[in-house]
Image: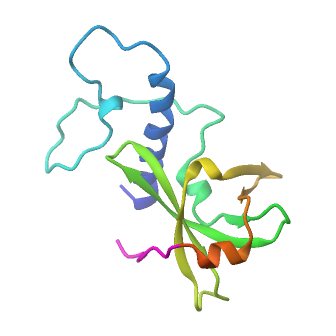
Amino acid sequence: MSYRNLVAAVVLSCVSVPALAQTPAPATTAHSSSEMGMKMADTATVKLKFVTVKPADITSSKLIGTNVYNNNKETVGEIEDLVIENGKTVTGVIVSVGGFLGLGERYVVLDPSTISVSNKDNKWAAYVDTDKDTLNKAPSFDYSKKK
């Protein structure tokens, strides 16, 4: 399975978790695989299930590489990766900021709830309410694109 497909599967499983949390849980002590998310193991521990992708769902492959703009329509960065907590929840979006043509860029991690995404004319864009100076002063994240 390719890295993009794996990340897409994780994102899709994360998108379904909030919807499940809004409905009452069945009266059982066992946890479903969607509540547990992915886990680190050398063997499969949960029976395979399939999900249906809804039209409003976004795959990670659409987000990674997407330009990030501020409210003044200035390019302030690019989405590089997603941080997934405990195999089930997207808790951060890694964005490259600063630099020019990849030189001098650094990485920051943004809270996903502070990012808006748009798909106009089949072109994805992300928007944040900030300026370049604030992002350049944000805490750096030590990130390598290597697997």
Q: Nearer the viewer, residue 8 or 138?
A: 138
In the image, what residue occupies the spot 57% across and 62% down? Answer: 64
Tell me which corner region of the image, top left, top right, bottom left or bottom right, holds residue 46. Answer: top left
In the image, what residue occupies the spot 60% across and 57% down? Answer: 63
Question: Does residue 145 belong to the magenta stretch?
Answer: yes
Which quarter shows the C terminus? bottom left
> What range is drawn magenta here?
139-147
Dominant SS of magenta comes to loop
Question: Does residue 69 belong to the magenta stretch?
Answer: no
Q: Is residue 106 above or below residue 118?
A: below
Q: Is residue 140 above or below residue 102?
A: above
Tell me residue 38's x, y (percent).
30, 43
Which quarter shows the N terminus? bottom left
Tell me which corner region of the image, top left, top right, bottom left or bottom right, holds residue 68. Answer: bottom right
Q: Nearer the viewer, residue 68 or 133?
A: 133
Indicate left or right for 59 with 31 as reference: right
Q: Is residue 2 above or below residue 36?
A: below
Q: Which residue is farthest bottom? A: 103
Indicate left or right for 125 with 147 as reference: right
In the image, what residue occupies the spot 55% across and 54% down? Answer: 111
Q: Which residue is farthest left? A: 42
Q: Nearer the viewer, residue 66 or 3?
A: 66
Tell me residue 7's x, y (percent).
44, 53
Tell me residue 102's x, y (percent).
60, 87
In the image, what residue occupies the spot 58% across and 84% down? Answer: 105
Tell me residue 21's x, y (percent).
45, 24
